[in-house]
Every structure is written in C-alpha cells, then in structure tokens.
Image (cartoon, grey):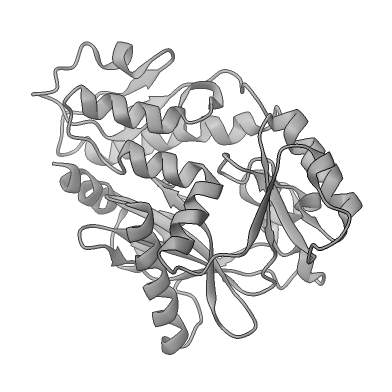
Amino acid sequence: MLYNQSEFVTQGEAQDLIAVQGVIACAHAVSAALAAGHRVVEVPVTTTVEDALAPYPADRWIVFNLCEGVNNRLFDEARSAWAIEAMGYHFTGNGGEALARSTNKAQAKAHLAAAGVPTPAWHLYRHPDQVPEAGLVFPLFVKPVAEDASQGIGRDAVVRDVAALRQRVAYIAERYRQIALAEAFVAGREFNVSLWGTPPETLPLAEIDFSAFSDPLARIVTFAAKWEEDSFEYVHTPVHCPAPVDEDTAERIRDVARRAWSAIGCRGYARVDMRLDAAGTPYVVEVNCNPDISPDAGFFRAARAAGYDYRQMAEKILLAAR
C-alpha cells in the first residue's frame, strides 16, 4: 500500500496540507479492507518511490498505488507511477502519462477538445499584465493549472471583470507559482461520474446540490466545501447519488465521461466532473485519474450505490492491476 507521507507543502496555502495528508487515512482504510484476504504492507513514501519499494521485489508484490507525491511537489504523482512501472511492478490505477496529462489542466483540455469532448473555453495567464483590457467574456473560473483537490479554489475563484481576473492571476502566480487557467464558467448543474474497468464501466451518477447558494456564481466546489468540515460550504454542498436526472440526460453525461476517459488515456479508475449548460450539454471541467477512494469520498459513494461494499471496491481495483 504505497502512499505519500508529507509534512509540508512546497507551494500554495498551508491549509492545503489537509488535502495532501488525506491520502494517509485513505491508505489505512484500503489496507484494512484488503487485509482479510491478502498480505498487506503499508509503505509510506517520504523521499522517493525507489527507496520506499526497495525491500519489496517486483516479482512478489503488487503495488496499490495511492502515492500523490511528497509535499505536494508538482507532477510527483505522475513521476511516481512512471517509476513504479519502470521498476517492474503491477500497480493499481492510472499510468504516468494519463496522470501527467490530467494534472496539467490545460493539456487535459487540449486533449479533450481534440477528441471532440465538450470542455469550457479557456485562457492561460502567467502574469496579471497578460490579461487584456477587453475582449473577454465573463464570468470566468480561475484556478492553478496543475493542482487538484480544489487547492487554490476559494470564493474568489469565479471572477466578473478584468480587475478581479488580474487579482486572481496574481494570487495564483505568487502563492502557487503556477500559470493561472481561466475558463468560461458554466452556471449549471454539476455531476461527478466515476468509472472503472476495461472497457470503462460508469457507476451511478452523482450530483452536487448547490441549492443553499442563491448566487449562481457561488455554486462551486471550493477547498472549504471539500475539506473544512465546519464551513458553510462543506455543510451545504450535499451530494445525491444516484443523481435525480432523466435517462436521456444521464446517457449524454455517461457518453461524455467515457469519451473523456479515452481522450486522457485513463485506466483502472477515474472520476470525470462536468457541468450542464442551459441547453443540457455536458461540459467536462476536470478528469481525475486515481481519485480519492476514502470511505467518505465520491468514488466509493458511487460504488456503494452500485452495490459494492468498501472491501469489494478495493478488491475490484486490485484485481484490475493483477
């Protein structure tokens, strides 16, 4: 059971460590679930994957890969998967290419667009001075180009004018040391689609309930909504799974999710996040390779709705690797 054990974050906010360390509890939960039928050893990574796996020969062990990188270093998750593969292990989840492609949101969107998968139009800004005075269509959703787990996303992430966009770009460049991705904000229903297997099977759809937010531009999954249990956002963004959606819309969502999986080159398991526009078109806003599989996370929620208990979910992911 390979996972990162981080003590600090190299960029971003100090609170981001909550998300980075969330994988530790997930690793313990999956280990406990698999221990009844397998010999399980928990292997925290504090320096490199190579050092951590040195005592465990590749011909005797399968790696259940939950390693997202040490101290939130950029693209360490992809690098870890490449290293595991090069060392000869069978391992769960996605390969390095898909992880790198999905982590870089701009590259992911380019691959989605090239495959004909709807994704909101976007711009990249390295510095606030690059933001033009005119020609942009607001509102825009602004986030770091290479973070996940809603890191760098707060109430100010949706901007309404040039001044706010420049302020947000400056914040991301300074605090996260990254390019800012600004994409057209789709003010519609938000769905999560969990997929696994070969060919990919879609689990029951999940919808985030934003009904407690009167302002449409506040209906986003912020860092607080995902991680801060005492916050208004966390308490008032319940998830309905299965989602209350008609079958025609559901099939459009599932079709787009499967095409997004293929465009990114996913394998094992993934989650596709999308929003519906006023015409009912599903727009992919995120492809999450190796999403959180904690007992309280969205992937297991969908697996449970499909009839799996936690051990069965973990077993299915493991068997796909074997």
x and y percent of residue 237 in the render? 65, 62
Q: Residue at x 75, y 69 (%)?
A: 212
Horizontal relation, residue 47 to residue 186: left or right = left
Horizontal relation, residue 61 to residue 240: left or right = left
Q: Residue 297: tell me if it is visible.
A: no
* Residue sitting nearer the eye, 203 or 28: 203
Q: Residue 296: tell me if it is visible.
A: yes
Quadrant (top left/top right/bottom left/bottom right) for the N terminus? top left
Residue 170 position (above or below residue 154): above
Q: In which quarter of the image is residue 44?
A: top left
Residue 104 position (above or below residue 155): above
Q: Which residue is drawn at 14% across and 22% down?
A: 58
x and y percent of residue 227 in the render? 63, 44
Q: How many marks?
A: 0
Q: Residue at x 79, y 37 (%)?
A: 171
Residue 312 position (above or below residue 306): above
x and y percent of residue 209 in the render? 63, 70
